[in-house]
Image (cartoon, rainbow, N blue to C red):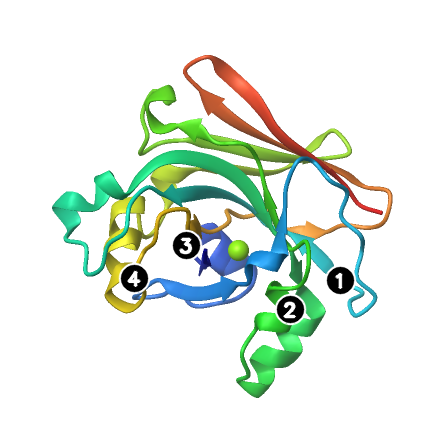
Amino acid sequence: MKIICIGRNYIDHAKELQNPVPKNPLVFMKPPSALLVNNKPFYYPEFTKDLHHEVEVVLKIARNGRHVQPEFAPRYYEKIALGIDFTARDVQSELKKKGHPWEIAKGFDGSAVLSEFVHISDFEDPSAIEFRLTKNGNNVQLGNTKDLIFDFDYLITYVSRYFKLQQGDLIYTGTPAGVGPVVIGDKLEGFLNTKNGEQLMFNCNIK
Ligand code: MG
C-alpha cells in the first residue's frame, strides 16, 4: 500500500508559501507507517519547532491499474476520506533550500492522519466537495475540490503513468490555503460536506 501525496494543488496555497503554481502535479510519498487512524493522538516530534497542519481530501484507490486513460479514471476511486498531511515546515524549508528530498519533513510517523471513508455517491457533486479544518474550535482551513488545479481524474491519469495504482493505495490531493502551526494541546477537527450535511470526519489531539 502506497500513500501518494500531491503538493501545491490549490492556487491560494501555492501563493501563501511563495511557491510557483506548478505545470504538472507535484508528487511525493509517505510510507505506510505514517498513517494515523481511529482519532489517535498525534505526538509532536522532537525534530521540529514548526509543525504545520495541511487538511486534504483523500482518495482510496479501488482497483489496480497502470497508464489509466482519463475517461476511465473515475473507475479508480469510489471512496473518499479526509486527512492531514502533517509537515515539519522548518525541516522542509531547509531541505528545499538544498534541493534535497522532503521525506523526513513529510513522511514521519503519524504524519498522515486519515478518517473513515465516505462513498463518492454520498456527495451532491463529487467535483465540488467542501471541507474544513478547525483548530480549537476555530476555522483555519476552508476548501472546495472545485478549486483543485489538477482534479481527481487528472491525478489518477498522471500518477499511474509512473506508479502502478494498487487497490487500497491512498492519494492525498493537496491542501487549500490556511496552513499553519500546531502546538501541544491543540485539538484539530476535520469536516466533510455530504448529502446528509456536514460530517465530523476526524479529531486529532496534539500531545
Ligand atoms: Mg500537503
**Circle number at residue 105:** 2
Gap between marks 4 and 3, in whole Å? 21 Å
Q: Closer to the N terminus: mark 2 or mark 1? A: 1
Gap between marks 2 and 4, in whole Å? 25 Å
Q: Are marks 2 and 4 in contact (CB under 8 Å)?
A: no
Residue at mark 1: 50
Front in this rendered view, residue 43 or 199: 43
Q: Mark 3: which amino acid?
A: Asn
Q: Closer to the N terminus: mark 1 or mark 3? A: 3
Q: Mark 1: which amino acid?
A: Asp
Where's the N terminus, which quadrant?
A: bottom left
Secondary structure found at label 1: loop
Q: Mark 2: which amino acid?
A: Ala
Q: Closer to the N terminus: mark 2 or mark 4? A: 2
Instruction: Select label 3 or label 2 by which is in front.
Output: 2
The spot of residue 13 in percent (x, y) is 50, 54
Q: Is residue 116 left or right of residue 76?
A: right
Residue at mark 4: 164
Outermost residue, top direction?
196
Q: Which residue is located at x 68 percent, y 53 percent?
A: 110
Secondary structure found at label 2: helix
Gap between marks 2 and 1, in whole Å? 10 Å
Secondary structure found at label 3: loop
Q: Mark 4: which amino acid?
A: Lys
Q: Is residue 147 left or right of residue 3?
A: left
Q: Are marks 1 and 4 in contact (CB under 8 Å)?
A: no
Residue at mark 3: 9
Q: Are marks 4 and 3 in contact (CB under 8 Å)?
A: no
Q: Quadrant of residue 141?
A: top right
Gap between marks 3 and 2, in whole Å? 18 Å
Q: Image height check: is 29 above or below 136?
A: below
